[in-house]
Image: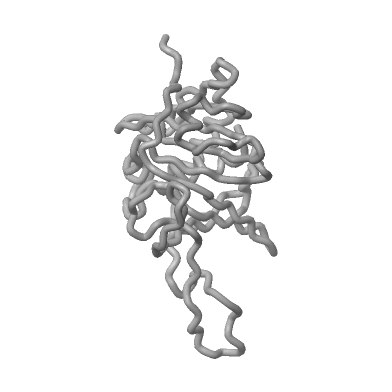
Amino acid sequence: MYKILKIFLFFILITSSLFSTTLKDRLLKAEKGDFIVTLQNNIYSLLLIQDINKNSIQIAEISLPKDKKTLPWRKWVLQDAPGNLAWNIYEIDLEKNKLIKCYSISRDCYLGASDQDNFLTRLLTLPLTSISEERRKKIGPAPLNEDKDHRAIWNPPMIVDGMAKKTDFIVFQTFWPKDDSDLSGKILDLYFDKNGTFPFPFWIQVTTGPLDIMLKIIDSGKSLVSLKTFPKN
C-alpha cells in the first residue's frame, strides 16, 4: 500500500465528522463521491469514497505521474484513468474495524490484506484533540519577549474543483504510537473546513522533530463517479 494512502486512510477513518464522539460516527458522515487529490514526489494520488453504508466503506486510490495529467479529474476517472500507475479499491468493515478485501483494478487481481488490516485496526482507536486558537499556527514572526501576540491565525488553502475557496478551519491533533510504521512517534495536525461540509482534511502537518512535513490537498470535490468496482463473484 502506498505511504500516502496509509496516511489518508488514517485521516479518513478518524476524522470524517468534526464534532462526532466516535470514529464510526465521523466516518459515516462521508458521502459517496467525495474525493481529494494530493501531490507528493511528483505523483498525484486521488482518493475517492466509492461507496458507504452503516456497515462498510469502499475507498478507491488511483495514482498518476504529474507529467501524465491531461484531463480534468472527473473526466479522467470516467475514462478509466489513462496512464495511472495503480488503481486499488479497499473495503473496510465498520463494525469489526478491519479491512475486508483489497482489489487492484490495474492488475485485475485481489491483493493481500494482512499488513493493511493491522494498520487499520490500530488507526481506528487513535483519539483526536482539538487545538485552541491560541495554539494555532500564526502568520508572521512571533513577538519578542513577552509582548502580546496579535498575529492573525494561519489557514491553509481550500481547493474545490480547481477553485480556491475562502473558509475558516478547525485543527485536530493526534499522536501515533511508536511502532515500525512511517508515522511512528509522530504528532499530526489536521486542518478541516470549520463548517464541516467536507469529510477530508485540507492540510496535514506531520511533526518529525526539528522539521515538519506538510501534505497538501491540491484539489477536492463531491459526487465524483467511477465505473470501476469489485468484480462480481
Taking the image as shown, residue 157 lies to the left or right of residue 20, namely right
Quadrant of the rendered image containing residue 195 = bottom left
Q: Look at 60% across and 54% down and name the residue there.
A: 186
The percent coordinates of residue 204 (x first, y second) are 54, 54
Q: Quadrant of the N terminus?
A: top right
Taking the image as shown, residue 17 lies to the left or right of residue 111, namely left
Residue extending farthest top: 233
The percent coordinates of residue 70 (x first, y second) are 58, 36
From the viewer's perspective, is residue 148 above or below residue 158? below
Q: Quadrant of the C terminus?
A: top left
Taking the image as shown, residue 96 lies to the left or right of residue 119, namely left
The percent coordinates of residue 112 (x first, y second) are 57, 21
Asked if one can make out residue 224 in the rendered structure from this viewpoint, the answer is yes
Q: Look at 64% across and 42% down and name the residue there.
A: 181
Q: Nearer the viewer, residue 67 or 229?
A: 67
Quadrant of the rendered image containing residue 23 = top left
From the viewer's perspective, is residue 158 above or below residue 92? below
Quadrant of the rendered image containing residue 128 = bottom left
Asked if one can make out residue 96 in the rendered structure from this viewpoint, the answer is no
Total labels: the figure holds: 0
Taking the image as shown, residue 33 lies to the left or right of residue 102, namely left
From the viewer's perspective, is residue 10 above or below residue 32? below
Q: Look at 45% across and 22% down and name the residue there.
A: 228
Rendered image coloring scheme: one colour
The percent coordinates of residue 60 (x first, y second) are 48, 31
Q: Look at 37% across and 30% down and name the residue there.
A: 51
From the viewer's perspective, is residue 198 above or below residue 81? below
Residue extending farthest left: 54
